[in-house]
Image (tube, coloured by chain):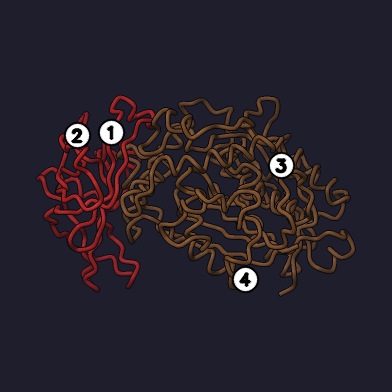
Chain colours: A brown, B red
Amino acid sequence: LGRIAIIGVGHSKFGKRNDASLRELAFEAYSAALDDADMDSSKIDGSVVCSATHYDKQRSPAGVVAEYLGLNPQPTFNIEAACASSAVGLRTAWALVSSKLHDVMAVVGVQKMTELSNEEIQELMGRAGDVMWESPFGTTMPAYYAMYATAHMAKYGTTEEQMALVPVKNRKYGSKNPNAMFQKSITVEEVLKSRPVSAPLKLFDCCANADGAACLIITNAEEARKLTDRPVWVAGLGLASSPMSLAGRKGPMTSFEVTKNAARSAYQMARISPNDVDVAEVHDSFSITEILNYEDLGFARPGFGTRLLEKGETELGGKIPVNIDGGLISKGHPVGATGASQLFALTKQLRGEVGSTQVDGAKIGLAQNIGGIGMYAAVTILKA
Amino acid sequence: MGFEKFGRFGYVSQTKIIPLLSYLEKGQIPATRCKSCGRTYFPPRVDCPDDRHSAIEWVVLDGRSSLVTFTKVFFAPPAFQPETPYLLGLAEFSNGLRVFAPISPSVDEKQLKPGTELTLKVAKGSPDNLFYWLE
């Protein structure tokens, strides 16, 4: 298999974007990615549009997005894997470019969530789980993750104060990211005092629905050499699935088997170990998720994820800086765009272009993206 | 009446597993067992993916289970908002199968922790819904 490179990245401002439609958000990210790659649309021979389409007013959004980006008559289609849509979009485009069916592709992650009414959002949230056996009891997205938090607290003595260190860290870095939805730091006390959502999770333990887009331009090694002098290589791709129903999962519910399986594939493909990772973006949909991710990715032993936070090991300057762009907790979570947003952040880090939040000498980056309530997980490893 | 009768608020109406409702009406918690390989399923299902056999028999469980984890929901989907806050749990039967279910409000919340022994029992909702919860 040939090497595949990311040669351009673009990112819209995330948040409550009541100034822009789905297609316009996609254009912001796509246009920025072409500028970043210093190229025009003429070489793009296909687009992969990544979106959890149940949130979009537009049905089959790839149709209108490709039209608006000026990418007809090239192939386009939609990829949906809930919150992991655009990580799976990259995997798809990787395979299409590796096979030589395509040469240069745009992976466009986009989501327009805030124009839905609260009622519509809550109704959708209620069907995030197994709709036959779990949704009829009033499940929510936070409720599922809260159940992992309860189990982790009981088994390892993890506390709500320790979990609060995740939003405190991530919001600190979010305050330095102009694309983030929330740009104000918060304190442990503010997290603990925020209103309960699904115990033990409170409002500031949770990421927010948002609008936004992020785009990656990818190509093969031959084209990459012609088109750029700063390629970032896709070194490892891991993707796994898990039972969607909570009742179908095994073990004490203190880790995500789906992340461990995806990580194993990605580390193997990239021929690296967790210790080799210089900078990481992990799926902090909730505070507890980031802690589980540290453990499932092998950054910490089971039960010791909170130690990394307490010792500042996942801060800038620590052993393994994590979510230095602010994470989902600061940026907001426009579901289909989140995976590409993580890879945008890593690409910038590996090129050394981040400025005040640059991880010095970063050569290997890892992104981990969970889909929905943990039925999908993608781990992507990039190398400078 | 279809399967939308299952749960506090049912989303799915059409399924092959409808006989579940008649067991619940009798106050019984049933699982299904593949007639070919003997594997038991809960929640019940009519198709066994192991040997792609779709002949099942129904078996009644005693409902005794051990709590794996739980949460208290404050922010709920629209149909459930009048009930907030409420408890949801994941429990494991002695046969190793698991159930996702509400925890009855009669349970003292302060006593709950992973490992707490509970029993899955049939519950009635409105208007004439049937479900099960952990007591």
Residue under pointer 2: B105
Percent x, y of residue A122: 44, 31
Looking at the rendered image, the disc whose residue lies closer to the viewer, 4 or 3, is 4
Residue that label 1 marks? B86
> Mark 3 or 1, which is nearer the eye?
1
Give the distance between the C-alpha atoms of the residues marked 2 and 1, in whole angstroms.
8 Å
Residue A272, disc? 4
Inter-mark Cα distance, 4 to 2? 50 Å
Element type at marker 3?
A: helix
Residue A156: percent from left, percent from top: 35, 54
Q: Chain of mark 2?
A: B
Q: Looking at the image, is mark 2 or mark 3 nearer the viewer? A: 2
- Could you tell me how far apart the alpha carbons at marks 4 and 3 are, in whole angstroms? 37 Å
Chain letter, disc 1 residue = B
Q: Is residue B108 left or right of residue B78?
A: left
Dot 4 and dot 3 residues touching (CB under 8 Å):
no
Question: Left of A206 or right of it: where is A49?
Answer: right
Instruction: Give me the residue at 22% from left, 43% from top.
Output: B112
**Residue type indicated by callout 3:** Val
The correct choice, above or below, for A356 with respect to A192 in the image is: below
Q: Which quarter of the figure has residue A64?
A: top right
Identify the amino acid type marked 2. Pro
Separation (CA) of disc 4 from disc 1: 45 Å
Neighbours of disc 2 within 10 Å: few (<14), some (14-19), many (20+): few
**Label 4 lies in what chain?**
A
Residue A367 rendering spot, x and y as whole percentages = 61, 56
Q: Is residue B132 visible?
A: no
Which residue has dot 3 on it? A65
Q: Are marks 4 and 3 on the same chain?
A: yes
Under circle 4, the secondary element is loop
